[in-house]
Image: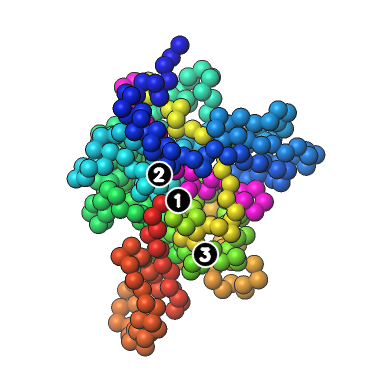
Amino acid sequence: MQESSELAVPLKERLFTTWHRLRYGLSFRSSVEIGNDPIWILGKCYFDKNSTHTVVVFSDEGKSAEGVPPHIADFIEHFYTLTWMTYRANFDQLEGSVFTTDCGWGCMIRSGQMLLAQVIHRHCLKHEWRYNPSGYPDAEMLLHKKIVSWFADSPNKKDCPFSLHSLMEYAKPLGHQPGDWFGPSQVAQLIKVCVNSCSSQIEEISSLFVYVAQDCTVYVGDVMECDPSTSLLILVPVRLGSESLNPIYIQCVQSLLALDHCVGIIGGRPRHSVYFVGFQGEKLIHLDPHYCQSSIKKSFGDNFDIRSYHCKTPRKLSVTRMDPSCTVGFYCRNRQDFEQMRRKVEPLLVPPMQLGVYPFFTFSDKRLSHVMGACQGLEFDSLSDEYTSLNITGPQEEFVVLDYRTDDESGNPP
């Protein structure tokens, strides 16, 4: 019988990891109820109008009540397929620091890793592919293992290009270091730099390019500079309120998560980052990185143990508790798919009853450089009093001025 990855870890490391689990894992000891409303997850809907069954999924072992309706079983299978990135302990020391764990500060980065893993799986495998750990290790399962291994916590950038170690190396030129708190827009930039720097060296994703929107605007002119066959990950950092989520955007959030082009949202609740993948009713379904596990060492061949990279238990969060600062992701297989995505997304960006005011984000046919060039020489003195009265403080805050309003990102700790 194959020894589990947990038992293969030395006793000292298991004790250290257990201590972190006590601090970062207690919230997982609860049950999650899945009701009768339609369940949406990354563009897929699971619903049986004739079902009256309510299922309680227990988080400790992923157990559920007997007699699970087929549509809920299909949803659980889909959710279990998603790659789950969590806090890890006892990995090789991050360069330039004393950190051998990201507990307490790396949750936003882990949420970003989950979104990127979803994109790469969408890029390399069929959208309908499902993870089956007991099945025969066919070519798709081997490719899945390979993709997950790219995120293993290792300083080897060649074998693990999207590891925490690799991302921290790319973060240094951006002014960040291990132990810093990252906001959703900062993680979006980190993903962009990392993927665009190394994708040409990885055959499976050599055609993937990451674009990050600026000032809540996707500049289509810049996107069109890519080759028509290039696959795109579009990341859009937004802020949907000041201290809390503005209720006018709730329907927008749900509508975007119901699109098949959407690959999730990097966000969470205040001081607690998660990866949103869907919703049921007024509850957002997400994967939570706040659970400490032992680091899995990257091994050669097909022996990389991926069992701890999957979660059987969906978590739920009331949409009203969602932090207003987040980053939405969209995957487009080529230019034609991007144009289709734009046609689907644009009608969903205007909050109901707002008459086109305060959209979720916007598309512009221009290029960013043209917009910036047109702004040169403009006088902003008349606005200075309004801006200085905002009393902006804190080194972790980011502000973007849009239509005489501010858009800040607080850089809250996880």
Q: Which mark is residue 110?
A: 2
Q: Residues within 10 Å of mark 1 (few under 14, many from 20)?
A: many
Residues at circles 1 and 3 in contact by the CB criterion of under 8 Å: no
* Upstream in sequence: badge 1 or badge 2: 2
Q: Which mark is residue 147?
A: none
Residue 35: % across, % down: 70, 43
- Residue 32 vertical placement versus 324 (above, below): above
Q: Is residue 364 left or right of residue 279?
A: left
The kind of secondary structure element at disc 1 is strand
Q: Can see residue 223?
A: no
Per the model, the C-alpha gap separating discs 1 and 3 is 15 Å
Q: Amino acid at mark 1?
A: Ser
In the image, is residue 278 part of the stretch drawn in magenta?
yes
Residue 314: % across, % down: 57, 40
> Is 42 in front, or is 17?
17
Q: Can see residue 393?
A: yes
Q: Which residues are magenta?
A: 272-301
Q: Amino acid at mark 3?
A: Ser
Q: Quadrant of residue 199?
A: top left
Circle 3 is placed at which residue position?
244
> Is 406 in front, or is 371?
406
* Upstream in sequence: badge 3 or badge 2: 2
Per the model, the C-alpha gap separating discs 1 and 2 is 9 Å
Q: Residues within 10 Å of mark 2 (few under 14, many from 20)?
A: many
In the image, is residue 298 part of the stretch drawn in magenta?
yes
> Is 204 in front, or is 57?
57
Residues at circles 1 and 2 in contact by the CB criterion of under 8 Å: yes
Circle 1 is placed at which residue position?
273
